[in-house]
Image (cartoon, grey):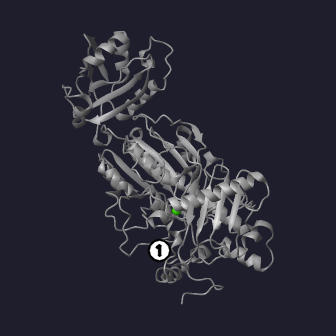
């Protein structure tokens, strides 16, 4: 592939017999960059660590001050760091028939630092040519959000059993895995409304499920969808549903605002080809019940999305449902179905990652995987226990861009993170300063905000079910305030009653006197106004410590109670204003028409 190399008088020329493929280039470059600690100077390639960046020809003037000799459509810029303490950071390649290196300032330093033969051998190792538009050079990284639907830390890399998640496990192994990430809401629309704008849903008045769809509501002044901010700096945006016609994402928006104009440029992966840079979001289909035909009431049992294709890794026999459910075959069956949904989701993630590689985009694309809210189980989604708000997050940084100082591949972060932090962090990836006044902090980037002690979450009306609950989650303790202690797990919610067979089962067993212990406690029609859980000692959050006499519990309670009060004032929690009846009432009929009404409950008037 490389025909000859010439080094003379500080000018270097390479002649290529034929263009190499993108994958060759990556392989060659990676091979050398992995040796970041030089041991033998005779191998000049080992003296370097860093990254390279590809940019389009029309950007070169800005980056390199108008260096001439462009023959090919693209040029490639290598940036690297001299591990010997030099300042070398740039070599220019003209990528096709000849190579021109003309950078006097660098040249003198380069040649003084390295013997020429070492420099030549370095060049030999770094040859490359770009072959198509999908592989064009770019100045900013692509950003891919893979947003998992309704899951807790139920991936193999988090230690979950009876799931098969090799793709996400692999991503975590070479990226960073976050252990303490919490959604701002235990249900889709308010959570997504928050992390898509960078404002708590309780501040922007988007905290009630599926609100503001028909009332002309606009986001508060200065608050904008994430994708609009990214477009400002040249990002093409996508909410991907298909890759070459194959369904990989739901394409759902589920935002509690609808009047902000177009939010994405496309929903097809192919449309991103040649668009540099891009922000793509893929909302996974799993884990969710298959409810979107709005005819769910007709179904005897509601299937999980994609269930027919899910490998049966988990079985009723091998799963261990949490102790607040009765050990019953139906509970075990439903638990296995959930876990198999997660394994099914991972397969789709695998397709996405493979496609990134195949299109030559992997090394230019930051990947964030996270859950939009917690686990889809009866006491999970809708509730601010950890099961409803504790979500997985994995971030993988691409080779072609300098990683932030606090990005440590292969490690696990224990810092408390809220999904509201994902918004300014993502903007930071795109080179956008955190907008002043935006909620959330940058947790990964060179302008990290101060650590957060607590992640705040809120639950308000969901479907026809009115409630108001607030949650403060620290590294260990979890404080919950229930504004309606007379409403809890047993409250009527038609979606839950129809889709989650565990709930009617428990109702029946309770009536028959067959429940004791935590399952019986869960079926109590009331809940304590305040709950405090030690998530270390009590990961299932069944022992309320709010009335504990232990000084450490009292201290945690006082601190977190106060933190919540301050947060509610500072963020102007709109939950103090109940929705009027004319807004709430229609949801009863809508939910009845969608899911039906259980015999014990009253139908809509
Ligand atoms: Ca969700």
Number of callouts: 1
Residue furthest out toward the bottom: 605
Label 1 packing within 10 angstroms: few (<14), some (14-19), many (20+): few
| Image quadrant where one finds the N terminus | top left
| Image quadrant where one finds the C terminus | bottom right
Check mark 1 vs ligand 1: CB closer than 8 Å? yes or no.
Answer: no
* Element type at mark 1: loop
Could you say where residue 488 lies in the image, as x and y percent from the top left?
A: 66, 72
Q: Is residue 386 visible from the viewing direction of this image?
A: no
Could you say where residue 363 lies in the image, as x and y percent from the top left?
A: 41, 38
As drawn, 360 above or below 572: above
Between residue 263 and residue 87, name the one nearer to us: 87
**Residue at image coords 72%, 56%:** 318
Q: Would residue 204 be found to the left or right of residue 107 on screen?
A: right
Could you say where residue 158 lies in the image, as x and y percent from the top left?
A: 63, 47
Q: Would residue 529 be found to the left or right of residue 434 on screen?
A: right
Could you say where residue 542 lies in the image, as x and y percent from the top left?
A: 74, 62
Q: Which residue is mark 1?
A: 293
> Quarter-wise, where is residue 112 in the image?
top left
As drawn, 546 above or below 407: below
Q: Is residue 383 visible from the viewing direction of this image?
A: yes
Between residue 68 and residue 183, name the one nearer to us: 183
As drawn, 212 above or below 568: below
**Residue at image coords 39%, 57%:** 239
Q: Would residue 603 be found to the left or right of residue 106 on screen?
A: right
């Amino acid at each position: 592939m490389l025909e000859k190399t010439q080094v003379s008088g500080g000018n270097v020329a390479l002649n290529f017999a034929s263009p190499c493929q993108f994958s060759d280039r990556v392989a060659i470059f990676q091979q050398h960059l992995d040796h970041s600690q030089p041991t033998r100077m005779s191998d000049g390639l080992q003296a370097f660590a860093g990254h390279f960046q590809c940019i389009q020809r029309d950007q070169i003037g800005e980056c390199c001050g108008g260096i001439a000799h462009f023959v090919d459509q693209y040029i490639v810029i290598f940036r690297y760091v001299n591990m010997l303490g030099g300042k070398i950071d740039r070599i220019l390649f003209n990528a096709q028939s000849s190579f021109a290196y003309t950078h006097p300032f660098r040249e003198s330093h380069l040649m003084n630092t390295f013997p020429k033969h070492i420099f030549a051998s370095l060049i030999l190792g770094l040859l490359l040519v770009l072959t198509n538009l999908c592989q064009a050079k770019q100045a900013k990284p692509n950003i891919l959000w893979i947003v998992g639907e309704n899951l807790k830390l139920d991936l193999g890399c988090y230690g979950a059993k009876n799931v098969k998640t090799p793709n996400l496990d692999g991503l975590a192994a070479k990226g960073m895995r976050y252990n303490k990430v919490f959604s701002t809401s235990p249900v889709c629309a308010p959570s997504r409304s928050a992390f898509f704008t960078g404002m708590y849903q309780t501040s922007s008045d988007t905290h009630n499920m599926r609100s503001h769809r028909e009332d002309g509501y606009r986001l508060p002044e200065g608050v904008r969808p994430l994708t609009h901010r990214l477009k400002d700096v040249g990002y093409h945006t996508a909410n991907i549903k298909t890759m070459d016609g194959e369904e990989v994402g739901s394409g759902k928006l589920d935002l509690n605002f609808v009047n902000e104009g177009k939010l994405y440029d496309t929903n097809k992966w192919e449309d991103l080809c040649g668009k540099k840079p891009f922000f793509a979001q893929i909302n996974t289909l799993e884990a969710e019940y298959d409810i979107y035909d709005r005819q769910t009431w007709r179904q005897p049992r509601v299937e999980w999305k994609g269930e027919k294709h899910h490998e049966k890794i988990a079985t009723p026999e091998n799963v261990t449902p949490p102790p607040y459910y009765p050990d019953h075959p139906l509970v075990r069956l439903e638990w296995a179905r959930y876990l198999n949904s997660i394994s099914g989701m991972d397969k789709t993630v695998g397709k996405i990652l493979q496609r990134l590689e195949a299109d030559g985009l992997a090394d230019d694309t930051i990947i964030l995987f996270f859950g939009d809210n917690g686990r889809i189980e009866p006491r999970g989604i809708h509730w601010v226990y950890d099961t409803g708000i504790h979500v997985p997050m994995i971030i993988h940084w691409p080779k072609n861009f300098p990683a932030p100082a606090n990005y440590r591949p292969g490690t696990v972060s224990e810092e408390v993170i809220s999904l509201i932090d994902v918004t300014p962090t993502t903007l930071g990836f795109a080179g956008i300063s955190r907008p002043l006044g935006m909620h959330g902090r940058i947790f990964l980037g060179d302008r990290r905000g101060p650590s957060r002690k607590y992640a705040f979450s809120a639950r308000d009306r969901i479907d026809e079910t009115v409630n108001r609950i607030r949650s403060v989650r620290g590294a260990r303790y979890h404080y919950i305030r229930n504004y309606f202690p007379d409403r809890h797990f047993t409250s009527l919610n038609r979606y839950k009653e129809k889709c989650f067979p565990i709930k009617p089962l428990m109702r029946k067993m309770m009536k028959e006197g067959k429940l004791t212990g935590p399952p019986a406690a869960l079926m109590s029609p009331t809940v304590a106004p305040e709950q405090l859980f030690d998530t270390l000692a009590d990961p299932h959050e069944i022992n309320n410590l709010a009335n504990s006499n232990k000084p450490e519990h009292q201290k945690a309670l006082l601190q977190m109670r106060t933190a919540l009060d301050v947060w509610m004032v500072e963020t102007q929690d709109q939950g103090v204003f109940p929705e009027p009846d004319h807004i709430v009432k229609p949801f009863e009929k809508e939910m009845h028409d969608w899911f039906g009404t259980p015999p014990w409950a009253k139908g809509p008037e």
